[in-house]
Image: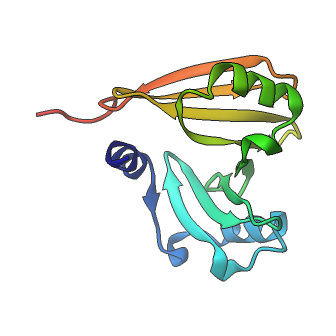
Amino acid sequence: MTILLSVLISCSLFVAGDAVPPKVKDAFSRQYMDVPTAAVTWGVEEEDFVATFLDARDRLAKAFFSAEGEWEETHTRLYPSQLPRPVRLYYEANHEDKDVSFIGSVQYADGSESYRIEWETYEAVHIEEISPEGALLESKRLSFTEGLDIW
């Protein structure tokens, strides 16, 4: 768990709300009118501003925006029982015995949706993107030492 926390901290930098450009905050407010501004925690991941919040159904969500205020995608945490049947069957066949740290949906600005499953091994975080039909779209392996200077 400590390793995962270190990886998350190295991948994401939290910023004060006043450091977020007004056009990004405005875009968030238009996209998520039902979420109070005070209930949003802002961060930066790579080039994107990331809003973390509870959605209207009390699910943890992260919305990604460009510095220009363009909404790019939103990740929403789900329980396995909330997955569409084909995705749940994929999860049950491939991941029930793994240390899964995230299962959720990903909504994209073009209107498409996929599902994301993340799990850890001793040396890496693994990420799979699954189609709504339960097909593997992409698989990534991020080493815990990737991008870190080791002495």
Say which quadrant the C terminus sits in: top left
Q: Nearer the viewer, residue 57 or 62?
A: 57
Quadrant housing residue 65:
bottom right
> Horizontal and vertical percent for residue 90?
75, 22
The location of residue 53, given as percent across then percent down, is 66, 66
Q: What residue occupies the far left of the structure in this picture?
A: 151
Residue at 79%, 17% (x, y): give it.
Answer: 135
Whether residue 131 is visible, yes or no, is no
Left or right of 48, for residue 12: left
Q: Residue furthest front?
A: 97
Q: How is the image coloured?
A: rainbow
Residue located 40% across and 44% down the image: 4
Relative height, residue 7 to residue 23 (above, below) = above
- Can residue 97 be seen here? The reply is yes
Q: Who is closer to the viewer here, 29 or 76? A: 76
Vertical side of 37 occupied by 132: above or below: above
- Give the residue at x 58% y 57%: 49
